[in-house]
Image (cartoon, rainbow, N blue to C red):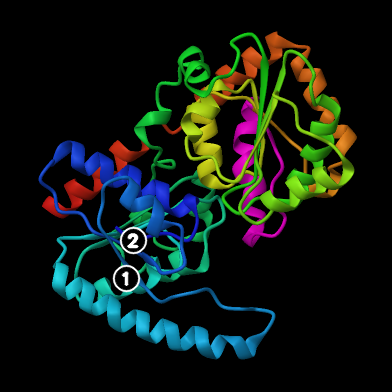
């Protein structure tokens, strides 16, 4: 298994590996990731061994820095070959990220069957380049098929989600997290690093709801912003009350999504998959800084079904977001309808479909 950098690439790989392990408990599974990616922490937590290679992304602003990037890429390619030769895999599955391309490409040169998974509605460059040598290309969104040439290889599977998201239980989740059963719980996050614009809007929401009875805000601020937010509150003399939780990283996302009445978040592919499988209504604020505006199209599939609302960042105003929160908070029936429609969009059998297809192809 290879994929990483962010949770959006790592967790689908873990979900596929978990499904393989369910079927073949003695399967020998090795993850390969990037030295600087989150995978070096997340993968061992799930009980899988991991090897790391020295790869990073290209710097489009400072081209001179790419000399080091190319050197790392060459070293990464050499190490990829050694890892594959030592481990001798029956097949390789890539889910994107910096380490994925060197490992998959090297496996293809070594005539080892490879399979790739594209999470987004607009695919990345690497997966489009790896398409030719791959046996199957799994898609998180049907719309991504427009950007691949070899239609016979495509399988619209949805995005794999770990088992803990599959049967959300609000009561148990709130008990586990220490959240009152009767409160309105708002969950907001912008990914592992955080999203500055979402954090800014949520700072305004925290000022509005701080200490308000019956209202809970759980904010995953991200590693880049967490300390700065706490410092800004100290400077203005605002002490977050007991109904406010500001976390650097949300480790137990499954429980928080199950406990939440409403989510405010970016719309990366994995976030959309986990939110819909959990049946949680959402206000999606797509990142405008992504290839092909793919986060907008990720969110659109759910919004068109009635399970989410989209606010584009260029239209985001702090007060407007608070107004939408207030409207939904005051309308439990609409929230229930959105929850059901969100759940209907969830890719509940993605891991099974991917494993079925890989094992059938490999056996054939």
Q: Quadrant for residue 332, please give it.
A: top right
299 magenta-colored:
yes
x 43%, y 71%: residue: 129
The image shows residue 316 at horizontal and vertical percentages of 84, 42
User: In this figure, which residue is indicated by the disc labeled 1?
Assistant: 103
Assess whether mark 2 and mark 1 are in contact (beta carbons under 8 angstroms). yes
Q: CA distance from mark 1 to mark 2?
A: 7 Å
Side of 314 relative to 199 (left or right): right
Side of 72 relative to 322 (left or right): left
Magenta stretch: dominant SS? helix
From this viewpoint, is residue 104 visible? Answer: yes
In the image, residue 170 sits, relative to residue 241, either above or below, namely above
- Magenta residues, start to end: 283-307
Q: Which mark is residue 2?
A: 2
In the image, residue 114 sits, relative to residue 141, either above or below, namely below
Where disc 1 sits, the SS reads helix
x 31%, y 52%: residue: 44
Side of 110 relative to 100 (left or right): left
Where disc 2 sits, the SS reads loop
Q: Nearer the viewer, residue 320 or 41?
A: 41
The image shows residue 156 at horizontal and vertical percentages of 41, 44
From this viewpoint, is residue 345 visible? Answer: no
The image shows residue 247 at horizontal and vertical percentages of 61, 40
Question: Callout 1 environment at 10 Å: few (<14), some (14 to 19), or many (20+)?
Answer: many
């Amino acid at each position: 298994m290879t994929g990483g950098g962010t949770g959006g690439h790592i967790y689908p790989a873990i979900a596929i590996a978990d499904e393989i392990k369910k079927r073949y408990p003695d399967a020998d599974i090795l993850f390969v990731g990037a030295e600087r990616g989150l995978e070096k922490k997340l993968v061992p937590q799930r009980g899988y061994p991991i090897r790391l290679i020295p790869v990073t992304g290209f710097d489009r602003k400072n081209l001179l820095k790419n000399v080091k990037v190319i050197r790392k890429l060459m070293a990464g390619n050499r190490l990829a070959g050694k890892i594959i030769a030592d481990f001798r895999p029956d097949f390789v599955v890539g889910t994107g990220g910096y380490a994925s391309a060197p490992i998959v490409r090297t496996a293809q040169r070594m005539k080892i069957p490879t399979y790739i998974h594209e999470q987004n509605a607009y695919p990345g460059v690497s997966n489009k380049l790896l398409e030719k040598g791959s046996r199957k290309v799994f898609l998180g969104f049907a719309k991504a098929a427009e950007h691949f040439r070899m239609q016979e290889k495509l399988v619209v599977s949805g995005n794999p989600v770990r088992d803990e998201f599959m049967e959300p239980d609000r009561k148990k989740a709130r008990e586990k997290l220490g959240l009152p059963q009767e409160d309105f719980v708002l969950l907001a996050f912008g990914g592992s690093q955080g999203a500055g614009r979402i954090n800014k809007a949520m700072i305004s929401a925290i000022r509005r709801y701080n200490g308000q009875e019956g209202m809970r805000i759980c904010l995953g601020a991200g590693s880049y912003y967490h300390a700065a937010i706490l410092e800004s509150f100290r400077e203005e003399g605002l002490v977050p009350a007991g109904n406010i939780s500001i976390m650097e990283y949300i480790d137990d996302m499954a429980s928080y999504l199950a406990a939440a009445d409403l989510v405010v978040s970016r719309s990366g592919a994995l976030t959309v998959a986990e939110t819909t499988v959990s049946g949680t209504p959402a206000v999606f604020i797509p990142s405008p800084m992504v290839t092909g505006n793919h986060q907008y199209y990720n969110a659109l599939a759910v919004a068109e079904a009635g399970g989410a609302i989209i606010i584009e960042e260029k239209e985001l105003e702090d007060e407007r977001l608070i107004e939408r929160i207030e409207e939904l908070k005051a309308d439990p029936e609409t929230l229930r309808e959105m929850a059901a429609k969100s759940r209907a969009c969830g890719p509940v059998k993605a891991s099974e479909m991917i494993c079925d297809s890989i094992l059938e192809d490999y056996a054939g």
